[in-house]
Amino acid sequence: MWDNLSLKEVVEYANDPYPSIRKWAKDTGKKIVGSTIADVPEEIVHAFGFLPVALIGTQKPLKKAPAKLPDNACSLARSNLELVMSYEGDLFDGFVLPQVCDTTQHLSDIWRINFPEKYVESFLAPRQADRPSARYWVKEEIERLIASLSNWTGRTIQDKDLLESIKVLNESKTLLAQIYDIKRKNPAAITNKELFALIKLSMQVDKAELNKSLKKIKDSLDTKTKAEGYTDVIMVGITCDPPEIFDLFDEIKINIAGDSLITGTRYLQGIVPENGGPVDALTARHFRRGFYSPIHDDVFKNFEEVKALYKATNAKAIVYVHIEFCESEEYDLPDLKNMIRKEGIPMHVVDTEYQTTSLSHVRTRLQAFFESLKGGSL
């Protein structure tokens, strides 16, 4: 189903993957386990023979979530809750929910209350990653998740099962990173929207199937021609939705040469060593990934990583995608803006939220920013 996709089809599937996931589940008879995005080790879910599906919100109207979460709750959290309560809940056999901030902690409780008949487990990532106990904690959580899934399924997995899943998922991330590198060198080879649709879809469908499409797409891309007239930027934040934002970047020839998104580079940083014990490897992977707003060991880490990425990509500006009412981003953004501006680096903030119906204000401000950038005055 996902093994021979064109880039056009990838964008269509990424916009609404659930009909294809339903068909896949019916054809294979396998269970679907959903997870909100933030470091749940999907390799474990995959090793049990399930399809791990990242929940990345919905653009459909909010009908039930407002009764469960206040209007000033994180836009992504509200959107994910609506997705399963009103639209796709029957598709999932279970959920593994990370708790990385106050909103996601409360969301896990709401989830359990509203889906008592389904498997619901939490994954508790330590927020202060620099503590000596953090590594021990993550390993204990990984082992607890394995035990919980074993109890639910009545099945025990072995190291070889985990290693096989790690290999499949590593291949996916490696191919995506290679495609990203092609785009970085030749912006016209693949659009921003197509690239990030590939990454998003890879987080939601069967990796073994999609990897076949990724290989064909990678081999078809132009690796020689250097397109002119593009402005390289880096994108910073958690997610970038709605996907039409990428259309705006493509229209005015802005090339995303690097990013720190969970639905971008931070996901691709999740390659796991295939030698040695898989649980230890998954534990170590958790601490190798880049800055993530609710979880970090240094309040200046975000700034240092953004500055380093900006220099490494020779970018001309930083674009920060701010999800309305995300408590973690609200905490980090003011300090990041101040530090970036002291460095003299141009920075533009895109304020957005799920269920956005019009991007005219985003378009106007984005165009004005880049016109100013080309004119040399900000």
Image (tube, rainbow, N blue to C red):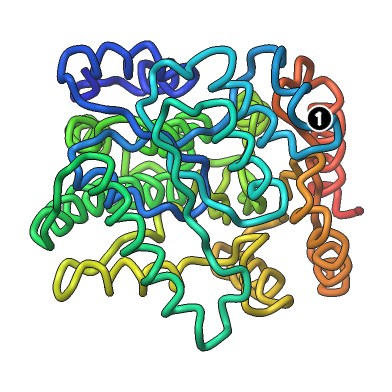
On screen, residue 295 above or below 59: below
Identify the image quadrant of the N terminus. Answer: top left
Q: Given the current orientation, which residue lies at the most extreme bottom position?
A: 132
Q: Residue at x 68, y 69 (%)?
A: 302
Looking at the image, residue 95 sits to the left or right of residue 332; the answer is left
On screen, residue 328 above or below 353: below
Q: Residue at x 37, y 71 (%)?
A: 139
Label 1 Cα neighbours within 10 Å, binned few <14 / some 14-19 / many ≥20: some
Task: State the residue in front, 68 or 165.
Answer: 68
Task: State the residue in front, 165 or 182.
Answer: 165
Looking at the image, residue 158 sits to the left or right of residue 225; the answer is left
Q: Is residue 22 visible?
A: yes
Q: Indicate the position of residue 218 as horizontal and vertical percent values.
A: 26, 39
Q: Secondary structure at mark 1?
A: helix
Q: Residue at x 37, y 11 (%)?
A: 19
Residue 141, located in which quarter of the rendered image?
bottom left
Looking at the image, residue 196 sits to the left or right of residue 236; the answer is left
Q: Is residue 189 visible?
A: no
Instruction: Give, as a three-letter code, the residue at label 1.
Output: Val
Q: Indicate the position of residue 12 as horizontal and vertical percent values.
A: 43, 15
Q: Indicate the position of residue 209 as horizontal and vertical percent values.
A: 18, 30
Task: State the residue in front, 67 or 27.
Answer: 67
Task: State the residue in front, 262 or 92.
Answer: 92
Q: Indicate the position of residue 239 as horizontal and vertical percent values.
A: 61, 42
On screen, residue 321 above or below 12: below
Count of labels in the image: 1
Q: Given the current orientation, which residue lies at the most extreme left position?
A: 160
Q: Residue at x 81, y 58 (%)?
A: 333
On screen, residue 57 above or below 175: above
- Identify the residue under disc 1: 362
